[in-house]
Amino acid sequence: MATEEYNKAGDSQQSEADSNNELQTQIHYRLIEKLTESEQRYRHLIETLREIIFECDASGNFTLLNRAWTVTLGYPIQSSLGQSPEEFLVPEDRGVWHQAMEIPANVKGLCRELRFLHQEGEIVWLELSLACKLHYGEKVFSGSLIDITDRKKAASNLRSINIALESRVQQRTQALTQSNEKLQKALDKLKETQGQLVQAEKMSSLGKLVGGLAHEINNPTHFIHGNMIHLERYCQDILKVISLYQKHYLQPIPEIEAVIEEVELDFLCEDLPGIIQSIQKGAQHISKIILSLQQFSKGSNINLYPVNIHDALENILSILDSQFPTEFNQKPGKIKMIRNYSKVPNIQGNVQYLNQVLINIFSNAIESFEDSRIQDRPVEDSHEKQIIVETKSPDSQWVEITISDNGPGIPEKFQSRIFDPFFTTKPVGQGIGMGMAISYQIVTEHHQGKLTCTSELGKGTTFTVRLPAVYT
Amino acid sequence: MIDLNKTALILIGFQNDYFAEDGLVHSVIDDLNRYDQVVSNITTLIKHWIETPATIIATPITFTPTYEELVNPVGILKMVQQLNAFQKGTPGAETIKEFEPLSQHIVEVSGKRGLNAFADTGLDDALRKKGIQSVVLAGAITSICIDSTGRSAHERGYQVNVLRDCIISRTVLEQEFYVENIFPLYAKVIQSSELF
């Protein structure tokens, strides 16, 4: 290196100026040092943040980015500076960025969720927090971008899990509902079976009791019944003798006259035939009861054969028509009979027994229209009284006969007792309460069928007889 | 347009203690990424200018082993003394190796002991003898020796130019601040490529 000798600045004024210059430089140096320290501290803070820190100029182009930009999205900072953030956004979210840029000056904390494209093409969700201020009259934007991809994925996963869970809950609920329905059906079936068993047991126990009782009552009743003919004849003979006495001995002795007066012989002679008749009627009623009781207590060994149920029904209806001629004609206020017959197979049964069942049901239906006298069974006089007889085959195994009336219905408290022996709603002396019990026995025991009753007050009652079909 | 007959390139602090990796005050400079570029840029400019009438002057800073030149030093000069940097006769005080092939074209003005290359040196005398009216500054460190020398040149009536791509600073902030805000107050800030 060429070395040349030059005079040093010897001027004292210049020397003082140089000295001042050095001092000022030292001052600047200190200022810069402090400024640098401060800048480095904040730069260090910014550079170590996981969140992206950015600044944009009035055009919306990046003027500052920290290291997190590269870490999060893969783009080098230098090549990103001067570009608009929207160039890194998925096209669908660019409008969101544009709107965000319309934020007024001096507003902080505008938040938006944006989808950025990673340098390798992957979508990264970033939460934008934006502030705007005026710098020398121009808008300057600054803010942060926080990676919320994991949060979004977690939320999405949670939504999927929730949907799957809801679906599973629905499936489980459906399965439970189905199980519940099955259980309910099983329970209903069990209750029905239990009811049938209870009824059967009741019938069986009662059958034995009633059988014994009927036998015991039958003999003395026979005595009464057998002697009644003689008693009646003897009474007639005695009355005949008394009449002759009165005719030929007009003036009996005072002692006889006193007794005649005492016993009121004229009234006695007049009343006695009536009493005898009444006793006869009573004895006949007892015999009828005994007959019912004996039938009830009979075993189930009856002769079964194919029966056309429509023929059986028509026979019964013709009998009833003659028995209740006024009820079955078509005059206003009388009972209208509606037949809804379907094509059904024969049933395996015994006509005699089935007739008894059908007569009982029809009689009850007919009588129910008269039973409005019972206080809690209202019926409107104005409505048309009708009985509907339906037949159908619900499946290949069964034939169903439904007999419905639109009478006053049976109170709920009585419905469970309909088929109980000795249960009747008729006044004393008018029914013994064995009709439906015997019918139940005939259907269930003798025919292996089902007899049910449903009723609603004010609407009517329906009896359903289900009997086994036969195809021979 | 610069008149190269009346222009001098002032090289400040291109010494190993600043620029060599094992330089004693090398660590002062954070903006290390620009080192190679700065050396490359100034070397290129010198290579061009040695073919021209322009004057090229180096103003190395050196101290005696006792640092008796420094009286109550503060700031970076204190650190220089503490680290025994720029001691005459040590490798750290020598001019960077990239200038060696060009050394015959560079005039050395010794005696710089502080921040201002004019203070206590014959630089002003040299410039005046050569009829220099315009100086072009390059070297280290932007906020210290470059600024101090620049202002001193300005005060002495020289037209001052600062080569923004041939000066090195401690930090990016300092570099940008001086280039953008301080130097324009008294100098023209230019790129070295504008000069050839």
Image: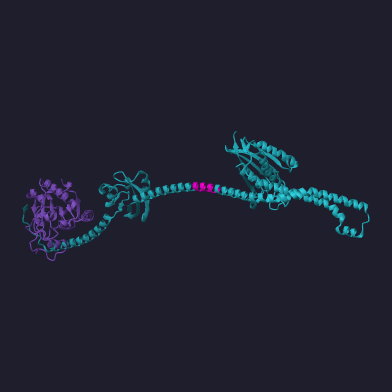
Q: For this rendering, which residue is in front, A212 or B13? A: A212
Task: Name which residue lies at 81% across and 49% down.
Answer: A232
Residue A300, percent across and down? 62, 43
Residue A310, percent across and down? 66, 36
Mainly helix, strand or loop, the magenta region? helix
Examine the rendering and report whether any part of residue A313 can be seen.
yes
Letter of the chain shown cyan in the rendering: A
Image side of residue A213 versus residue A182, left or right: right
Residue A351, percent across and down? 66, 38
Image side of residue B168 versus residue B67, left or right: right
Residue A36, percent across and down? 23, 58
Q: For this rendering, which residue is in front, B20 or A414? A: A414
The residue sitting at the top extreme is: A472
Task: Name which residue lies at 37% across and 46% down.
Answer: A95
In the picture, the quarter occupied by the C terminus of chain A is top right
Q: Is residue A187 magenta?
A: yes
Q: For this rendering, which residue is in front, A212 or B190? A: A212
Range shown magenta: A177-188
Letter of the chain shown purple in the rendering: B
Image side of residue B63 versus residue A353, left or right: left
Give the colour scheme of this rendering: by chain
Q: Is residue B131 above or below residue A344?
A: below
Q: Is residue A270 above or below residue A398?
A: below
